[in-house]
Each structure stands twice: as C-alpha cells, then as structure tokens.
C-alpha cells in the first residue's frame, strides 16, 4: 500500500535526470486541488465539488419530520410507500421538508404525482394528507420506536380544483 | 515565510515526483472499470421518468425544469458506458476517458437531483479528474501495444498522487464538517445512538447491528470517536504511506458497518479508496516472488 518509491540515487549528472512535470500539469493540479480544498473547508456545494456533509449534524433524541399518507373514500389512511415506488420518488424527505414553501400549484403537482404513483399500484386516493411528526427515538417499545406525535399540516385532493395544500 | 515556502516546495516535490506508469494504469483500469459498472447499473432510465414536480436539480441540471428525457438519457448512458469500457482497456485513452467522464457527469448529477447530494459516485468522479489530461494509457493498455514500454517518469506520478490527495481530503473534510457543524457533541452526545435508532425504525425490520450499538451508550461513543479519528486522520497516509495498512481497512470497515447497520450502500466510495490508495503493482512485485518460491 505504499506510494511509489523515490527513484534510486544515481551518479549521473543533471543531464541524465528526468524532465520535471510539465508546467500545464502544475497549473491544472493546483487549480483543481485549490477548488477541492476551498469547497471542502468552507462546506460549499458546487457539484461535483462538494462540502462533504455526511451525517455532519448532531442528532437529538426528539426528531422532527413529516409523513405523507393517502386517504381512500372510506377515510382510511395509508402511508405512501415511497421506498416501494420508482427511484424518482425517493426524495420524499426533502420534498416534504420544503413542501410548505412551495407555491400552491407546485404543492398540487407534488400531491398529484404521489397520488398517481399510488393509483398505478392499485391504491385508491381521494386525498393526500401531510402530517408534521415529532418522534422521540429514545422512547422504545421493544425493538421499535414509540409512534410519533402527529399534527396535520396540509391536505390536497388530487384532481380537484382545490388540489393545493 | 521561509518555513511556509519550504513546506509548499516539499508538497510540490512529492506531488510531481516521478511515478510508475503501471500504477497509473491500475488506477485507470480500476476507476474506469468502476465507472463502467456504475454506468451500466445506475437507475438513470428510471429517473428520467420522474414527474417534473419532484425534480430538485443540482448544479448545472438547474438549467432544466425536469429530468432529461428517457431518449437523451439512453443515448448518454450508451456513450458514457462505451467510452468508459474503452478507457478501461486503454483504447484511445486520451479521448475515451474524458468522453466517459463528461457523458457520465449529467447522469450522476441526476441521482443527486432528488433533494440530497449523493456522495457515492462523487469521489470516483473527482479521482478521475487528474487522469483526464494525463498519459493514463501509457502502460497496460491497447494504446501501449503500439509503442515502446514507458518507464517511470514525471508524467506518471502526479495523476495518482492528486487522486490520493482527493481521497484523503474527502474523508478529512467529512470529519471536519462534523466538527464544524456538531462539534464534540458528535461524539459526546447521544448523536450516534439516535441516528442508529432512527435508521433501524425506518427499515422494514428492526436492524440488529444498529440496535446492538444504539443500545450500548459507551459502545456508541467509542464508534463515533473512532469514526471521527479515522476521517480526520486519513491524510496521515500521504505523509506516512505505511499507515495505509491501518486507515484503508478502517475506512472499508466503516463503510461495511454503515451498510450493515443503516443499509446505506457506499461500496463505490470504498472501491475508489482501494483502487487509489493501494500500490497494486508494488504489492504484486512483492507477492509474486513469494508465490513463485512457494510453488517450487
């Protein structure tokens, strides 16, 4: 796992030494590493350069979040199974987090997209509800966490004129 | 500032010292092959059908209002994959490697356009950057069969060492981000326990590995401290190459642990570390005579 060993010392004079790395390579490496280091140290996202924020925040036991559910005509709620939907739907955590800040037509479009995906799987969707949750992961019930406290934040009826949240 | 100047010169001397074209070739083959596998198995066609309302673009994909069309994605994927395979075998390397990288970029960006940066392939892409303008096809390639064998020289050292700096920096900055955003609480608080409980609760079945650590506060603190130490200490490998025997397995163990406990698959990052940080030709030179001796 070692890096290349330095070349063995020789008795030859300077003329026998290999030429140094070309000037363009020095500029190229310097510029690339400078950008890489600036983004890394300052936490900047200039993808593919990145601030490398992987699990960077300290989590608390009480964790706020969101839950999206579909409601059928009988009023039964079913959590949207995002993990079972195509990969394009897997950004649910981030979409839910920013849902409140979206314009009403974008909120309606998001609800519509989720409802369509659930209907494609044979589900019945009269309404989509979004709950704000507060989960205390330190409260354990066997191997599982205690159910979160929920507050309904948004309701949308996909396909109807008041579709937005 | 003679001390700073001397330090810069030392770094420059190390970075641009002569290198073995075989080592550069192993990095080209390893990273090129890894890119080809990722391009062949990535969820790009599925992402292309994402409803526009769910599109959360990153970087240059902000120029679009939805994911690229399935037709564009299929064409790009075919081009990137073909170029990556050709670069791996070393055919027209100075053209095929940059083409593979440029064509892969929007595809990989799609995977990070769901609202969260996915770091899985970022390390691979960044480690390939120094290889793009280099003579990565000078050895162990189809290109090299038409030329006399290249010996060690200044053209072959800097691409590999720049990639090594990127790997070391990636882990160090990951640790630094934890210190800057969470401080010592990342280790001293219940942080890791809560992360693991939340991850286990989000999985269809309780995760025994996550719960084993989360149920034992002292063990959770130790794992958190070890994680931070490995991440922040990784650049020591550049200063003392022998420390790779400690840090590379530690990083692999860390990714394996994350995979077991959280079901987060970081294998492309782990594979990139193995390809870049291990001097495979030197290892082969050491092991081969021993094997030959044993056969006698």
Image (tube, coloured by chain):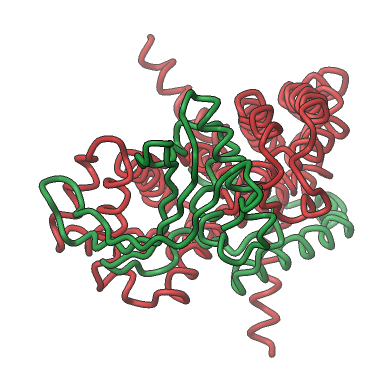
Chain colours: A green, B red
Which residue corresponds to the image point at 48% horizontal and 37% vertical from the top-left? B267
Quarter of the image that includes the N terminus of chain B: bottom right
Q: Residue furthest bottom?
A: B1
> In this view of the protein, which residue sits in the foreground, A154 or B87?
A154
Give how far across and how far down residue A158 sits, in percent: 59, 43
Q: Is residue A16 left or right of residue A91?
A: right
Give how far across and how far down residue A164 sits, in percent: 61, 55
Give how far across and how far down residue B68 sits, in percent: 78, 37
Which residue corresponds to the image point at 72% horizontal and 36% vertical from the top-left? B21
Q: As displayed, is residue B169 above or below residue B123?
A: below
Q: Residue furthest top?
A: B296
> In this view of the protein, which residue sits in the foreground, B190 or A117?
A117
Q: As displayed, is residue B64 above or below residue B184?
A: above
Q: Is residue B174 left or right of residue A26?
A: left
> In this view of the protein, which residue sits in the foreground, A38 or B27?
A38
Give how far across and how far down residue B249 sits, in percent: 38, 44
> In this view of the protein, which residue sits in the foreground, B219 or B230?
B219
- In this rendering, the count of numbered labels is 0
* Rendering quarter of residue B217: bottom left
* Rendering quarter of residue B153: top right
Q: Residue furthest left?
A: A142
Q: Is residue B172 left or right of residue B13?
A: left
Which residue corresponds to the image point at 79% horizontal and 46% vertical from the top-left? B155
Quarter of the image that includes the C terminus of chain B: top left
Q: Is residue B105 visible?
A: no
Which residue corresponds to the image point at 14% horizontal and 55% vertical from the top-left? A140
Q: Is residue A134 visible?
A: yes
């Amino acid at each position: 796992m070692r890096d290349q060993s330095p070349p063995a010392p020789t008795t030859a004079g300077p003329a026998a030494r290999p030429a140094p790395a070309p000037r363009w390579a020095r500029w190229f490496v310097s510029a690339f590493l400078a950008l890489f280091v600036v983004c890394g140290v300052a936490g900047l996202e200039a993808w593919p350069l990145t601030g490398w924020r992987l699990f960077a925040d300290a989590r608390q036991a009480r964790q706020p979040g969101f839950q999206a559910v579909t409601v059928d005509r009988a009023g039964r709620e079913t959590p949207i199974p995002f993990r079972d939907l195509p990969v394009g739907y897997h950004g649910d955590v981030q979409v839910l987090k920013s849902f409140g800040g979206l314009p009403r037509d974008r909120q309606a479009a998001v609800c519509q997209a989720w409802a369509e995906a659930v209907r494609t799987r044979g589900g019945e969707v009269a309404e989509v509800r979004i709950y704000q949750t507060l989960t205390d992961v330190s409260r354990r019930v066997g191997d599982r966490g205690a159910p979160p406290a929920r507050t309904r934040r948004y309701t949308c009826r996909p396909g109807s004129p008041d579709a937005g949240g | 500032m003679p001390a700073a100047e001397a330090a810069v010169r030392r770094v420059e001397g190390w970075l641009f010292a002569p290198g073995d074209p075989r080592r550069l070739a192993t990095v080209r083959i390893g990273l090129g092959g890894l890119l080809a596998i990722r391009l062949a198995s990535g969820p790009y066609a599925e992402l292309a059908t994402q409803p526009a309302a769910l599109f959360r673009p990153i970087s240059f994909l902000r120029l679009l209002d939805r994911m690229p069309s399935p037709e564009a994605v299929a064409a790009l994927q075919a081009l990137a994959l073909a170029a990556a395979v050709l670069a791996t075998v070393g055919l027209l390397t100075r053209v095929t490697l940059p083409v593979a990288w440029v064509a892969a970029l929007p595809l990989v960006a799609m995977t990070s356009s769901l609202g969260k940066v996915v770091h899985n392939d970022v390390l691979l892409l960044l480690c390939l950057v120094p290889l793009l303008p280099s003579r990565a096809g000078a050895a162990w390639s189809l290109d090299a069969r038409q030329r006399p064998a290249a010996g060690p020289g200044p053209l072959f050292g800097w691409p590999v060492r720049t990639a090594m700096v990127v790997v070391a920096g990636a882990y160090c900055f990951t640790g630094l981000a934890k210190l800057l955003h969470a401080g010592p609480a990342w280790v001293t608080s219940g942080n890791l326990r809560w992360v693991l409980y939340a991850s286990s609760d989000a999985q269809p079945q309780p995760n025994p590995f996550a719960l084993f650590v989360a149920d034992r506060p002292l063990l959770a603190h130790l794992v958190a401290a070890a994680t931070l130490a490995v991440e922040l200490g990784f650049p020591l490998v550049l200063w003392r190459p022998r420390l790779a025997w400690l840090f590379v397995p530690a990083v692999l163990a860390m990714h394996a642990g994350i995979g077991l406990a959280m079901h987060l698959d970081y294998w492309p990052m782990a594979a990139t570390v193995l390809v870049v940080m291990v001097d495979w030709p030197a290892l082969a030179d050491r092991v081969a005579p021993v094997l030959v001796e044993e056969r006698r």
